[in-house]
Amino acid sequence: MDNWENVATLAATIAAAYVLVLWIGIIAWTYRDIHERTRDTAFQIVAVLLVLVFNIPGWIIYMILRPSETLVEAYARSLEEEAILQELEEQGICPSCKRYVSADFVICPHCRTKLKEPCANCGRPLNFNWVACPYCMAQKKMVATSAQKEPSEVSQEEAVEGPERPRAASPQTSVEP
């Protein structure tokens, strides 16, 4: 019987060592996994303690509750989303009809809204807020209204006559001296 007891003791020792190594392995794996999935230290501690205290049932609960993607995956996804949004922004949207238009369109082909103005020198589309063409370096010709005209732009007739002044209403009856 000594033989059977030795074999049973050896088997129990091997099983206990296996369970202990499995338990430590699951704890280490959980620690690494949770650090890859969140920066919340409270959640990291709770996850490791859950597996530490409850072993395999705690690990199963952790697997159910853990974040679905790692921080690297979340970062990559956000970069993809940002790239898609940048591409859509570069493509442009018509402010009137909200349809997608190409960046080099001068007018919207759907609603004919003026999107940009062509360069007077090279003809390439220019944004309204640009002061020079980035392609040919030509200065953008500013459209000045009569209220914005420079003194040099005032015509000779306007200079001679002067600006129009409102006329005072003449009284119905006038007194002559």
Image (cartoon, rainbow, N blue to C red):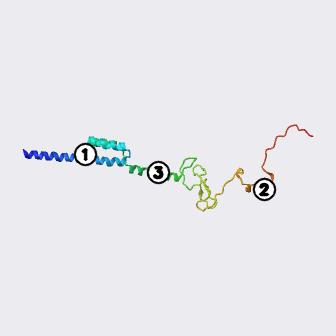
Q: Amino acid at mark 3?
A: Glu
Q: Amino acid at mark 1?
A: Trp
Q: Is residue 57 above or below residue 80?
A: above
Q: Is residue 38 left or right of residue 2?
A: right
Residue 82 in picture, x, y percent from top left: 46, 51
Q: Which mark is residue 156?
A: 2
Kindly tell me whether residue 60 is visible in this rendering.
no
- In this view of the protein, which residue sits in the foreground, 11 or 74? 11
Image quarter in which the C terminus is found:
top right
Q: CA distance from mark 1 to mark 3?
A: 41 Å
Question: Which of disc 3 and disc 1 is earlier in sequence?
Answer: 1
Q: Is residue 59 above or below residue 109?
A: above
Reading the image, the residue beneath label 3 is 82
Q: CA distance from mark 1 to mark 2?
A: 97 Å
Q: Is residue 149 left or right of residue 130?
A: right
Q: Amino acid at mark 2?
A: Gln
